[in-house]
Amino acid sequence: MMAYIQITQPRHVALMVRDLDAADWFYGNVLGLPKCDRPLNFPGIWYEVGPFQLHVMVHADAQPPLYNLQKWGRNAHIAFAIKDLSAAQTALSAAGITFQMSASGRPALFVRDPDGNVIELSES
């Protein structure tokens, strides 16, 4: 019998960005994620969502691939549960941020951060 690894919970996901200030505006102000301590000495910001963290790191050539231009949800993405989809739509529109509603018809939308990383916001 093959041995397996017992994964107990997710810890974090790391995203690469070119512009840390623009990423901080998007994740900290638009999405409202709180920052947490980051004990490292290279450029980046960590955000905390319950027991989960989002690690944003800088690389001058960061360019996430977007394989499906018409349906952003069919690309690599991070999903966050939200309370009110209508409020999210209003906040994104007020910030001048383009988003796509989920093609499945469920209460969710997809948005791209300033560097093009796809984020799903799904009402729960």
Image (spheres, helix red, strand yellow):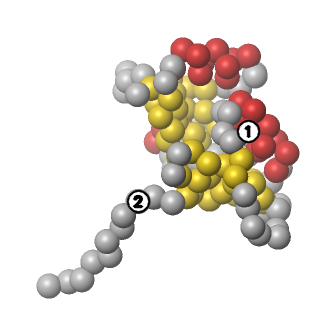
Q: What amino acid is labelled 1 in the image?
A: Gly
Residue drawn at the location 37% of the way across and 24% of the way down: 106
Q: Is residue 41 left or right of residue 1?
A: right
**Residue matched to label 1:** 28
| Along the viewing direction, whichever of 32 and 74 lies nearer the viewer | 32
The image position of residue 40, as x and y in percent, is 77, 69
The image position of residue 62, as x and y in percent, is 74, 58
Residue drawn at the location 82% of the way across and 68% of the way down: 42
Q: What amino acid is labelled 2 in the image?
A: Gln
Residue drawn at the location 66% of the way across and 49% of the way down: 47
Q: Is residue 113 visible?
A: no
Q: Quadrant of the N terminus?
A: bottom left
Q: Is residue 107 left or right of residue 68?
A: left
Disc with the residue nearer the chain's start (1 vs 2): 2
Q: Quadrant of the C terminus?
A: top left
Q: Residue pushed farthest left?
A: 1
**Residue matched to label 2:** 9
The image position of residue 49, as x and y in percent, is 57, 45
Q: How many marks can you see?
A: 2
